[in-house]
Amino acid sequence: MVKLSVIVPFYNVQQYAPDTLKSLRANARDDFEFILVDDCSRDETPDILARAERELPGAVHVRHEQNGGLATARNTGIDAARGEYLTFLDGDDWLAPGYYEQLLASIEGLGCDFVRTDHVQCTARARTIHRVPYGRRGVVLDPREAILPADRSTSVDYAYAWAGIYHRRLADRGLLHFTDGLRTAEDRPWIWKLHREAESFATVGLLGVFYRRGVASSLTQIGDVRQLDFIRAFDQVISETAQDRDADKLLPKAVRTYCAIISHHLGSIERFEPPVARKLKSMSAVALRRMPQDVLDDALDSMDIQRATRLRRLRRRPAAAGVSA
């Protein structure tokens, strides 16, 4: 029986894939499988993964004939996974030796639906520890308790899928799949659904994932139209949260986070191509008008003057014909 399935999407990461695969080898175990999903790479990544399938114990190589994006690639891995537990890694990140054995031991010891972990963020030679923004460690809790408060960073803002481990029953309930086709912010609807609908979770102070920032091919570094998928992602968060039994309590958090992300993108709008920048403004204005307006009013009143003024000005912007998410 496969104990742990590790789902690793790759797309044009020939420079980093060897380090990722080396770190997987240092985590291999007879009852672990590594599902390597090539999302139709155009560089040497497919050849690297073909070799890995022969040389890495437990490796399963799956190739997409068309590029579908990170969400779709992860779904392919989830559908192929056979493990009692699942976790994720991105194709340009890496692991500490023996990390997965410790991660598996943590969730088996706690007996909960999922466990969230800290990680190390790597930018060039700098290393920074980033912690799950939830203070109680090693205690099994209701995931809904970690969504609020609205005005502080909480567990739903720490959306990294690879910073944790998940029991198969979540996949069986449809809680681990991502929204197909989302090119960015794919983990936002995912983490919100997990916290609203799973029954138990815990956080642990376990470090072992090294998250590489500043990769030139990463969508966070590219100002093209794919970045605007954050609007579709957060529209989904708002829509699904509005149907929740505690919508009146949870929507202020969802709306305030959406506003903060819109403001963040507007604050760095110069990195977008000019047509994309114009579309960002138009789509964001429409998105603001789609939100529950009373909740939006309260969210803007709670934000600092600079962000609130920027968003109020955008909210008054005339709608452009044909603009939608």
Image (cartoon, rainbow, N blue to C red):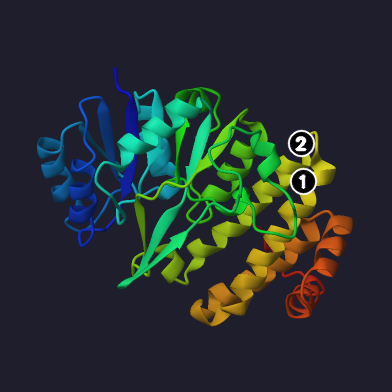
Report how far apart the C-alphas of labels 2 and 1 lie in the structure: 8 Å
Mark with earlier residue (2, 1): 2
Where 231 sits versus 101, above or below?
below
Q: Residue at x 56, y 78 (%)?
A: 268
Instruction: Look at the numbered discs 2 and 1 and tell me whether their residues touch, using CB distance below 8 Å.
Output: yes
Q: Quadrant of residue 324?
A: bottom right
Looking at the image, which residue is at 46% across and 51% down?
Answer: 118
Mark 2 surroundings within 10 Å by alpha-carbon count, few (fewer than 14), some (14 through 19), many (20 or more)? some
Three-letter residue code for mark 1: Leu
> Which residue is tagged 2?
244
Above or below, comparing residue 221 to residue 167 in the picture: below
Left or right: residue 100 compared with residue 255: left
The spot of residue 204 in percent (x, y) is 49, 43
Q: Nearer the viewer, residue 48 or 131?
A: 131
The quadrant in which the N terminus is found is top left
Looking at the rendered structure, the secondary structure element under dot 1 is helix
Residue identified by numbered label 1: 250
Residue 220 lies, with reference to residue 209, above or below; the image says below
| Residue at horizontal 30 percent and vertical 54 percent from the top | 11
Kindly identify which numbered label has been placed on residue 207: none
Q: Is residue 76 visible?
A: no
Q: Residue 196: x, y in percent? A: 67, 36
